[in-house]
């Protein structure tokens, strides 16, 4: 399992992230039933705001769940939002990281103060299926997400056919421009079904990143990065969320036009440095390189619900701007 990457039967981490190390899910003493299966709930709440002054949408692969959105981001849109919920039943002996990759819920995050390189996503749906057995995505009935200002019924969608090894339904928001307030308290409810008891649980979302600067430049104005030179990124610390902030992580993606991304994670202290060793042609391609720079605040909150052994909500709130990497 990658650091803070995926759910596991002993450590449930989803976005980022305190995500540094494994967060313990709220569950009973024994998360498997007598038949040796475990039921896991993975809920993702994502909002990405384009800060570019010219209103041309820019995005990085991590900003949206492409499999869950009803369509690609709209040119000129100020933001893209996505809510997804998956409740999967699988063998307790299954490789949890492979299972999450198959259902599209994996999350790769380095430990605070370190970085990683993310290659363009490939077709991994068939990789390692023999190690996980069958995954059943459970029907939870009618699923609704609520805040003080929003009530959003989620749409049930059939999971793409993977040769009967993965089957069932998952849930997504219907509109990629839906209002997702932050900070806010989110309530998730289901009517239940013959496969899963009805449930209701809450999770608090952090504020999105604000006042982001790269060096002396406002992210909204676009930024110039020098190859081989560390880039200092600053953001406003959310002073009003002391309890939640201890669980929050800031991660920053610099994504080239070819889809390769440099990802660095930081404690939410208001400042982080992207190493110059990662801002070079070997990572981002020939220079000068056009790129996007996205700053994310992510929080992972475990939840407990009837019939769900391991549950987690991951909030991922980001702002995105243009970047250009040039030789010194």
Image (spheres, helix red, strand yellow):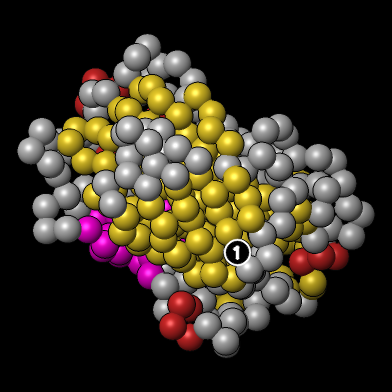
How far across and down, in percent of the image, does residue 21 sit? 30, 64
Q: Nearer the viewer, residue 31 or 189?
A: 189
Image: 244 above or below 290? below
Say which residue label 1 marks: 147
- Compared across the picture, whether 171 is left or right of 290 comes to left
Element class at badge 1: loop
How far across and down, in percent of the image, does residue 296 sit? 59, 62
Residue 210, located in which quarter of the rendered image? Answer: bottom right
Specify few, some or many for label 1: CA neighbours under 10 Å numbering under 14, 14-19, or 20 or more: some
Magenta-drawn stretch, dominant element (helix, strand or loop): loop
Residue 241 among those drawn in magenta: no
Image: 184 above or below 176? below
Magenta range is: 11-27
Q: Nearer the viewer, residue 221 or 149?
A: 149
Image: 109 above or below 65? below
Name the residue rendered at 35%, 61% in the picture. Answer: 302
């Amino acid at each position: 399992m990658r650091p803070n990457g995926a759910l596991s039967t002993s450590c449930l981490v989803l976005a980022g992230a305190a995500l540094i190390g494994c967060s313990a899910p709220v569950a009973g003493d024994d998360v498997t039933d007598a038949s040796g299966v475990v039921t896991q709930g993975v809920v993702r709440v994502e909002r990405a705001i384009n800060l570019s002054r010219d209103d041309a949408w820019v995005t990085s692969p991590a900003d949206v769940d492409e499999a869950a959105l009803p369509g690609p981001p709209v040119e000129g849109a100020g933001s893209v939002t996505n809510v997804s919920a998956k409740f999967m039943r699988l063998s307790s002996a299954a490789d949890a990281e492979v299972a999450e990759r198959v259902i599209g819920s994996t999350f790769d995050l380095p430990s605070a103060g370190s970085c990683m390189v993310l290659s363009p996503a490939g077709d991994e749906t068939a990789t390692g299926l023999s190690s996980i057995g069958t995954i059943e995505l459970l029907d939870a009935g009618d699923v609704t997400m609520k805040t003080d200002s929003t009530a959003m019924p989620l749409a049930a969608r059939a999971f793409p056919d993977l040769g009967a090894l993965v089957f069932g339904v998952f849930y997504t928001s219907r509109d990629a421009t839906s209002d997702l307030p932050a900070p806010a308290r989110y309530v998730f409810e289901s009517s239940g079904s013959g496969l899963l008891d009805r449930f209701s649980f809450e999770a608090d979302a952090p504020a999105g990143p604000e006042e982001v600067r790269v060096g002396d430049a406002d992210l909204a104005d676009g930024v110039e990065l020098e190859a081989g030179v560390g880039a200092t990124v600053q953001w406003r610390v959310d002073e009003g969320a002391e309890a939640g902030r201890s669980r929050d992580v800031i991660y920053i993606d610099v994504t080239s036009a070819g889809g390769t991304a440099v990802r660095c994670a930081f404690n939410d202290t208001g400042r982080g440095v992207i190493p110059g060793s990662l801002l070079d042609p070997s990572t981002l391609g020939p220079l000068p390189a056009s790129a996007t720079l996205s700053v994310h605040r992510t929080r992972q909150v475990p939840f407990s619900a009837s019939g769900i052994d391991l549950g987690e909500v991951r909030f991922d709130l980001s702002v995105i701007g243009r970047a250009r990497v040039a030789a010194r």
